Amino acid sequence: MTSSFHDTRWTLISRSRGDDAGARVALSELCAAYYEPVVMFLRHDGRMADEARSLAHDFFAKLLGGDAIGGADPTKGKFRSYLLAAVKRFAADQRERCNAAKRGGGQSHVIIDQGESATGAGLQIEDDHIEPPDAAFDRQWALTLLALALARLESEMTAIGKAVQFTTLKPWLTAETDGISQSTAATQLGISEEAVKVAIHRLRRRFREAVKTEIAQTVSDPERVHDELEALKAALRQ
């Protein structure tokens, strides 16, 4: 990894309990990375798409604007687990407020989305094929983390003058090589096919390191990086 473990975002947040500017910046960066997983959780928890995004904004505004992070337990070790528990509480509280309003505690406006079918995610219908909210959150977390790692690697390759090589060989990282051969890549890069194979091997290795670096930003103990990597693989297999 390119920096000491103690400089990672989650250790900074959990160590300071979010009371200093550096911790707030770190929290903001982590929240930005976790926006889509939270939206995915809310969608699979029964919200329509627009409502899920609106609630996600409210959730992160509350997290960033208050002292909610003060409840984070650094011994738990994983920002992912902390955030999932927090959004579960938020979603339950929001649903309870809506139910209270329907019972007469206030007024609510019901929006009927004509774009959703009768089997849309906005309805609570038992279906073995519907992904549970927790699993949806973890899967989107995994996809988001891979995207962050890919962006990190692209930035590193660009910095050393290998942007064209990265763009050409990127399909071998994202499994999007349909219609692309290594010989074609070799021609585009002006190198031998054997050199392309070596470059792909090195790029994959650097990508794995980038993934580990991104994971390290979200745990408070370096020993947990391996566990989160296994969790990522499991989420992608679902």
Image (spheres, rainbow, N blue to C red):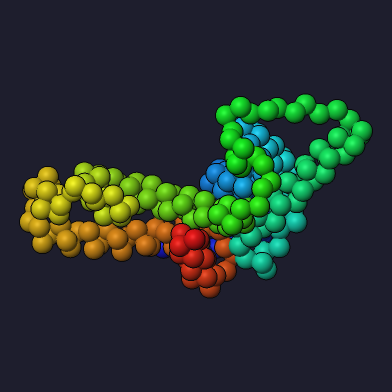
Q: Residue at x 82, y 44 (%)?
A: 96
Figure check: 99 above or below 201: above
User: For the view shown, which residue lies furthest in the right direction?
Assistant: 104
Residue 43 percent location from the top left of the image = 61, 43
Q: Quadrant of residue 218?
A: bottom right
User: For the view shown, which residue lies furthest in the front direction?
Assistant: 118
Q: Residue at x 21, y 44 (%)?
A: 164
Q: Nearer the viewer, residue 75 or 52?
A: 52
- Is residue 155 in sight in this rendering? yes
- Is residue 56 in sight in this rendering? no
Q: Nearer the viewer, residue 83 or 108?
A: 108
Figure check: 222 above or below 24: below
Q: Quadrant of residue 129?
A: bottom right
230 sits left or right of 89 in the view: left
124 sits left or right of 229 in the view: right
133 sits left or right of 147 in the view: right
Q: Residue at x 62, y 47 (%)?
A: 44
Residue 42 percent location from the top left of the image = 64, 45
Q: Residue at x 32, y 52 (%)?
A: 174
Residue 30 percent location from the top left of the image = 57, 49
Residue 237 percent location from the top left of the image = 45, 62
Figure check: 111 above or below 123: above
Q: Nearer the viewer, residue 117 or 110?
A: 117
113 sits left or right of 201 in the view: right
Q: Nearer the viewer, residue 106 or 84?
A: 106
